[in-house]
Amino acid sequence: MERVLDNPNIALRHIQIPALLTASSRAMFVVLAPLKINPPAIPTLLVARVCAWLTGARLVIDWHNYGFTILGMKLGPTHPIVSLARRFERCFGKRAYAHLCVTDAMAADLRQNWRISGQLVVLHDRAPRHFRRLDTAEIHQLWTRLLEDPQLEPLQPLSADGALLTARGSDGTIDMRSGRPMLLVSSTSWTADEDFSILLAALKLYDAAATSQVVARSAGTAALPPLAVLITGKGPQREHYEQEIAQLGLQQVRIATAWLSAEDYPLLLGSADLGVSLHTSSSGLDLPMKVVDMLGIHELVTGANGLVFEDAGELARQIQDLAASQRSASDGRYQKLLEGAAAFRSVDWTTNYQRVLELF
């Protein structure tokens, strides 16, 4: 952000949001919905086209999703307002000097169904450079501090000596703690395009399996570790799911919901063992940035760096398999995914974007 603020070639113009756009009534939402969706295709595409024409500038559209499909999640795909938004977006979005797309699937759709004009380039999103795996000392420092946050109190029973994942030895060295929980992180906007009932159902299945193996663990046999789950974000459905979480009665799974600072969020991801995204694309073509921060998805996910799931049962089995693999010296599946994720992160956002700029 500092580079944007300090760049002499970038001028920021703050727009005051009219009170009319904050109206909450159903009738006003239907009228104003096309102006409130994100991405804001209406009226942005028209304004951008006019400005480019008046100034002779080259218009480049960075496609991350279609606005009308997001609007369709609110009003229904056949609503007249959604049909109008679709026509607007296609009319004013099909002509530009260049189009950037986050997936091959979106590029194919724009080429075949929109018949766009201008250069078409696929630019897979990447996380910024500061999204990286933390070392053991950094994990210890982070979680010693995070556990002081009241939001994370549900995770306290899984901690030891004020740390969740690590332990300080008698000689002062810090290592990952023996018998520590596995840390699973999921980030969300708590909106309708992320069905967290899938994750909660999967966690119930994991808890049942892990609880049944407590006796095996006490007898010295390898068993599923306890699971520390941290769901970050804020949004309209957060309270609803927090109430569901409170009723689960889990024994080997502890769940906390929290809103972390922009500085702590990448550190949290860098300390996690697993990351889960429940994003459902409104268009079926876009790329969820939450998973790009963790790794990448759609055509970016392969058997070497991540897994995809269809339902709670499959997700529960994957978590169990990876938890067992992480604790096993002979099972290399979890380590393989770590190495694949590291390879994906070897190209950061700046490097990736620079490759595309060279095409222009």
Image (tube, grey):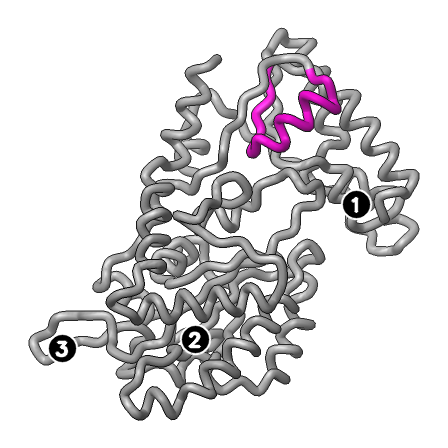
Question: Pointer 3: what residue?
Answer: 169
Question: Pointer 2: what residue?
Answer: 227
Q: Residue at x 45, y 33 (%)?
A: 5
**Crowding at mark 1 (Cα within 10 Å: few <14, some 14-19, many 20+):** some
- Give the x, y percent position of residue 202: 57, 71
Q: Residue at x 62, y 24 (%)?
A: 61
Q: Which residues are magenta?
A: 98-116
Q: Residue at x 30, y 92 (%)?
A: 219
Q: Earlier in the sequence, mark 1 or mark 3?
A: 1
In this rendering, the label closer to the viewer, 2 or 1: 2
**Crowding at mark 2 (Cα within 10 Å: few <14, some 14-19, many 20+):** many
For label 3, the SS is loop
In the image, what residue type sits under mark 1? Answer: Leu
Question: Mark 1 and mark 3: span between their CA atoms?
Answer: 57 Å
Above/below status of 115 relative to 154:
above
For label 1, the SS is helix
- Give the x, y percent position of residue 227: 43, 75
Question: Pointer 1: what residue?
Answer: 21
Residue 175 counted in the magenta span: no
In the image, what residue type sits under mark 3? Answer: Gly
The answer to whether the residues at label 2 and label 1 have Cβ atoms under 8 Å apart is no
- Give the x, y percent position of residue 172: 11, 74
Question: Mark 2 and mark 3: span between their CA atoms?
Answer: 24 Å
Q: Quadrant of the N terminus?
A: top left
In the image, what residue type sits under mark 2? Answer: Leu
